[in-house]
Image: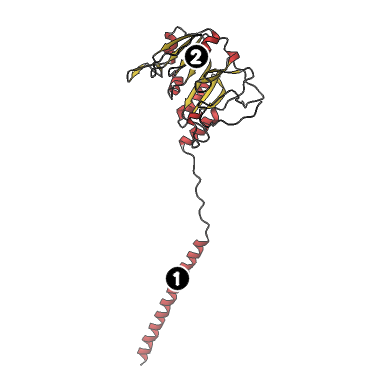
């Protein structure tokens, strides 16, 4: 009987050891679970702006206008779409005018030509309707502006430099208006420093905001010009393009040769701009009167 009792005792010991090991493992696992449950949840990683969003923010900051101490803003052209601001008192040295993007009418060019008694060269290769200007000297060119001389789909393009040279205006001081639906970027990037320095004022409608080449273009222009006015085109107002209010915006660029920066007031109340489409809601930022 003794061996049997011994064997049974051993079996009981083995059973209790197994139970102890099992319970110990369970408690250890429970402890790990409790410990893990006490750990704080990891914080979500911040969403970083995309490359395009960074470009948009930088461009928005770069196009903010400054106040010029010697600029008297006046409106030239149509009452709404087609009208642009210039420093009316800083046009005295201009000898020739260039108007790009006509679409059959060009009151801006006619107003400038009439006021200054100079020739205005009008360019458009999409709408070949020649504008009427009874009080000024207008010359229409069935050609568009770009960064090279070429023909696309039967339409001729050439550079600002070549067009000025062909009109025998090389060396003259110029005033320029440009609304060419996106071709403005390559056009200004392709212009030489000497030509940009001869442009006293340039009213340009820019299109787009998410590309780094836009920043390069504006940065280059700001080496020669002050931005004296910013107007958002309400044809293109878009609440999803923040901080931009519109994907089309008009800038008045005044050459640093003639513009004098106001050292006190840098914010410009824009009181002469009007909505491009009077029937649509406008998207300008309200500014107090000076």
In the foreground, 245 or 127: 127
**Residue 242 in the image: x percent, y percent?**
51, 36
The image shows residue 35, relative to residue 100, as above or below, that is below
Residue lying farthest to the bottom in this orientation: 1
Rate crowding at label 1 as few (under 14), some (14 to 19) or many (20 or more) other CA atoms within 10 Å: few
Q: Is residue 71 left or right of residue 95?
A: right
Tell me which label, 1 or 2, sits earlier in the chain.
1
Q: Position of residue 278 (x, y in %)?
A: 52, 27
Q: CA distance from mark 1 to mark 2?
A: 88 Å
Q: Position of residue 152 (x, y in %)?
A: 34, 20
Please give the name of the residue rendered at 50% of the width and 16% of the height, measured from the top-left corner: 107
Q: Residue furthest left?
A: 154
Labelled disc at residue 260: none
> From the viewer's perspective, is residue 56 above or below residue 273?
below
Residue 72 vs 11, above or below: the answer is above
Q: Secondary structure at mark 1?
A: helix
Q: Which residue is mark 2?
A: 109
Dot 2 falls on a residue whose secondary structure is: helix
Which residue position is annotated with label 1? 26
Q: Quadrant of residue 162?
A: top left
């Amino acid at each position: 009987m003794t061996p049997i009792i011994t064997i049974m005792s051993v079996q009981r010991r083995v059973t209790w050891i197994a139970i102890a090991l099992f319970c110990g493992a369970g408690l250890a696992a429970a402890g790990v679970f409790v410990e893990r449950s006490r750990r704080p949840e990891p914080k979500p990683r911040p969403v970083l702006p995309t490359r395009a969003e960074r470009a948009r923010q930088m461009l928005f900051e770069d196009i903010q206008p400054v106040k010029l101490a010697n600029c008297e803003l006046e409106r030239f052209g149509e009452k709404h779409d087609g009208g642009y601001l210039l420093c009316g008192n800083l046009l005295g040295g201009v000898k020739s005018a260039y108007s790009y993007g006509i679409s059959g009418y060009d009151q801006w060019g006619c107003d400038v030509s009439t006021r200054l008694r100079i020739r205005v060269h009008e360019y458009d290769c999409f709408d070949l309707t020649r504008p009427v200007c009874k009080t000024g000297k207008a010359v229409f060119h069935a050609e568009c502006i770009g960064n090279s001389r070429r023909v696309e789909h039967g339409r001729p393009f050439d550079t600002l430099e070549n067009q000025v040279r062909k009109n025998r205006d090389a060396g003259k001081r110029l005033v320029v208006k440009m609304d060419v639906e996106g071709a403005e970027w390559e056009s200004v990037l392709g212009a030489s420093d000497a030509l940009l320095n001869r442009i006293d004022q340039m009213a340009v409608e820019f299109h787009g905001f998410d590309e780094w080449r836009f920043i390069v273009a504006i940065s280059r222009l700001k080496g020669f010009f002050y931005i004296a006015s910013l107007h958002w085109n309400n044809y293109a107002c878009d609440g999803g393009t923040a901080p931009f209010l519109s994907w089309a915006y008009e800038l008045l660029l005044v050459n640093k040769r003639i513009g004098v920066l106001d050292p006190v007031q840098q914010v410009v109340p824009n009181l002469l701009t009007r909505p491009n489409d009077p029937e649509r809601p406008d998207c300008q930022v309200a500014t107090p009167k000076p």
